[in-house]
Amino acid sequence: MSWSHAFYDRQIWEKVLKEKMGSDLLIQMARDPDCPKVAAVSTVVNHAPPVKAFVFKNYSLLVGVRSHYRGSCRHRLWEAIRASSAAPGYFQEFALGDDLHQDGGMLINNPTALAIHECQCLWPDVPLQCVVSLGTGRFQTAGRTSVSYTSLKTKLSHVISSATDTEEVHTMLDALLPPNTYFRFNPYMSEDVALDESREEKLSQLQAEGLQYLERNQEKLQRAVSELTRDKSSTQRLSEWLRLRALMHQGFYKI
């Protein structure tokens, strides 16, 4: 921890990722017609402030279309996972080219708005059909500080909490997106659980609380499923076919 600022050995983690994920580039996943568009977000921390998000993706945009976020489809899948999971205190930063990557949650802990932006870049003329946002659970502390004074520890805790908050993005999207388009699932937890929790009883508790939450939100879940399984319109199918032809013309499918 004192040497690398990380509790876990990055070399073991990288070895596991390489063994399980192989060495394929992200864009090579596009060869599979059934493979969905996938993106993973990291935070680049070694350039001049402010820190910037970086999007690892298995797709490329048409010529003339630019995303608001830096990114690439020319990295490997294991590299994307390694970079986007480099949570401070858990795993050491990940150097890739001229960039030093840390966990995307440092900057964009709820990437739903980023995902919507990327979708608009991919399919600029297609109306948004359905957005499903899955949270990792939330825990509400009962603590309260003095009206006139807060400690430095409390101040820092509030800054970190605000920077990693996921519900503000949810509140904004819930107000802006059309009805029956946006679905957020994020259960309350009975206790705050660490990122690296591995005890069987704690994992079982998380699972039970998640199932209870889904049972209470069964109607909402069914509406989301209905939207996700709705057949594509002929306009959508034509748009996707035209886009595929354009990408083939640009040479992205010759890798």
Image (tube, rainbow, N blue to C red):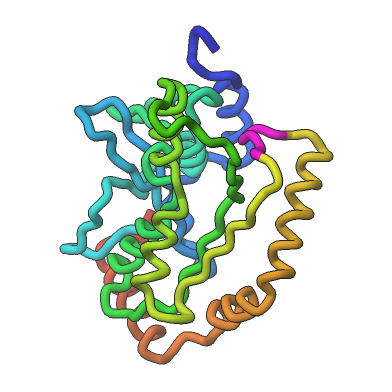
Residue 172 location, x and y as percent? Answer: 36, 63
Residue sitting at the far top: 3
> Which of the two residues, 212 or 29, is positioned nearer the viewer here?
212
- Quadrant for residue 44, please give it: top left
Residue 196 in the magenta stretch? The answer is: yes
Residue sitting at the far front: 148
Q: Residue at x 34, y 71 (%)?
A: 176
Residue 193 location, x and y as percent? Answer: 66, 38
> Which of the two residues, 27 or 65, is positioned nearer the viewer here?
65
Q: Is 87 left, or right, of 57 in this rendering?
A: right
Q: Is 215 left, or right, of 125 in this rendering?
A: right
Could you tell me if residue 116 is visible in this image? yes
Q: Residue at x 58, y 63 (%)?
A: 185
Residue sitting at the far bottom: 234
Figure check: 79 above or below 74: above
State the quadrant of the N terminus.
top right
Residue 99 in the magenta stretch? The answer is: no
- Quadrant for residue 53, please give it: top left
Residue 31 location, x and y as percent? Answer: 46, 62
Could you tell me if residue 58 is visible in this image? no
Q: Residue at x 40, y 54 (%)?
A: 168
> Which of the two residues, 13 or 89, is positioned nearer the viewer here?
89
Residue sitting at the far right: 201
Figure check: 90 above or below 36: above
Report the magenta residues as a range. 192-197
Q: How many tags in the picture?
A: 0
Q: Main secondary structure of the magenta part?
A: loop
Residue 155 location, x and y as percent? Answer: 40, 28
Q: Residue at x 46, y 50 (%)?
A: 166
Q: Is 64 left, or right, of 136 in this rendering?
A: left
> Which of the two residues, 13 or 92, is positioned nearer the viewer here?
92
